[in-house]
Amino acid sequence: GQNIDQPTEMTATEGAIVQINCTYQTSGFNGLFWYQQHAGEAPTFLSYNVLDGLEEKGRFSSFLSRSKGYSYLLLKELQMKDSASYLCAGLDSNYQLIWGAGTKLIIKP
Amino acid sequence: GAVVSQHPSRVICKSGTSVKIECRSLDFQATTMFWYRQFPKQSLMLMATSNEGSKATYEQGVEKDKFLINHASLTLSTLTVTSAHPEDSSFYICSARERESEQFFGPGTRLTVL
């Protein structure tokens, strides 16, 4: 079956770094997405990885290891506005997104 | 990036009435549109996938007669919740993509059924 696993909740301190892990099992693989979702809003796109390695985009970076079925989202210099849910989603062979349940990130001052 | 709009953003209706939600791709042709439902503090649940000009493919457990989906053009898909009941109250989100490219999400529609 297809499955995406990520932690339910994480807490971090403003200004610090946090890494949100995601493991995936999909029927075929066409990439791994990370989305940010604030409460009551639709998800917004953060990153897309299809090749192994690290993609850096400002304070956010995303890593993919296809052999391990593993990805992480790295958030640096955390700000209070980064408090949100972070959704990991794998794109399967039919180009359908398989969603994780999301990781709620709580930022403390 | 591409823009997807949804209308209305919020709707409150009485039990037994039907509600139509529109999803539009504003600057690209959406060959495929997706409808999701999200309960509080839960992840997105895919309801159905629709390709322009053909019938929607519904996920297991989603009643196709209750959630009518129409994808009549490359820029518009509609979801009609028929005979709505309080348990249908939820956040409905559409997304659209052009061929096998990235999905772009609409802002969502908050439905409250009294």
Image (cartoon, rainbow, N blue to C red):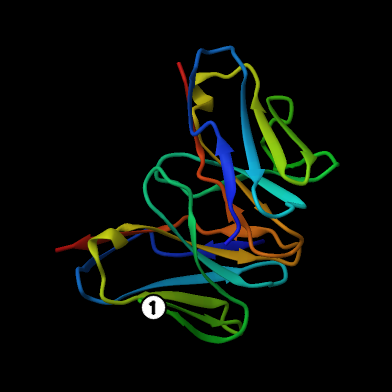
Query: Which residue is at the front of the view, B100 or A29?
Result: B100
Please say if B79 is above or below A58: above
Tell me where residue A84 appears, x and y as whole percent. 34, 56
In the displayed structure image, the side of residue A109 where residue A105 appears, left or right? right
Tell me where residue A74 appears, x and y as whole percent. 38, 76
For the residue labelled by badge 1, is the local secondary structure a helix, a strand or a loop? Answer: loop
Total numbered labels placed on residues in the image: 1
Query: Which residue is at the front of the view, A20 or B52?
Result: B52
Residue farthest along the front direction in this orientation: B27
Please say if B26 is above or below A23: above
Identify which residue is drawn at 14% across, 63% down. Answer: A109
Residue farthest along the left direction in this orientation: A109
Please say if A29 is above or below B58: below
Q: Amino acid at mark 1?
A: Gly
**Rendered-image quadrant of the C terminus of chain B:** top left
Residue farthest along the bottom direction in this orientation: A53
Tell me where residue A17 appears, x and y as whole percent. 27, 77
Quarter residue B88 falls in: top right
Identify which residue is drawn at 53% across, 81% down. Answer: A64
**Rendered-image quadrant of the N terminus of chain B:** bottom right
In the displayed structure image, the side of residue A81 where residue A38 appears, left or right? right
Q: Residues within 10 Å of mark 1 (few under 14, many from 20)?
A: few
Q: Which residue is mark 1?
A: A58
In the displayed structure image, the side of residue B6 where residue B113 appears, left or right? left
Identify which residue is drawn at 22% across, 76% down. Answer: A16
Identify which residue is drawn at 74% across, 53% down. Answer: B29
Report the chain holding disc 1. A
Query: Which residue is at the front of the view, A8 or B24?
Result: B24
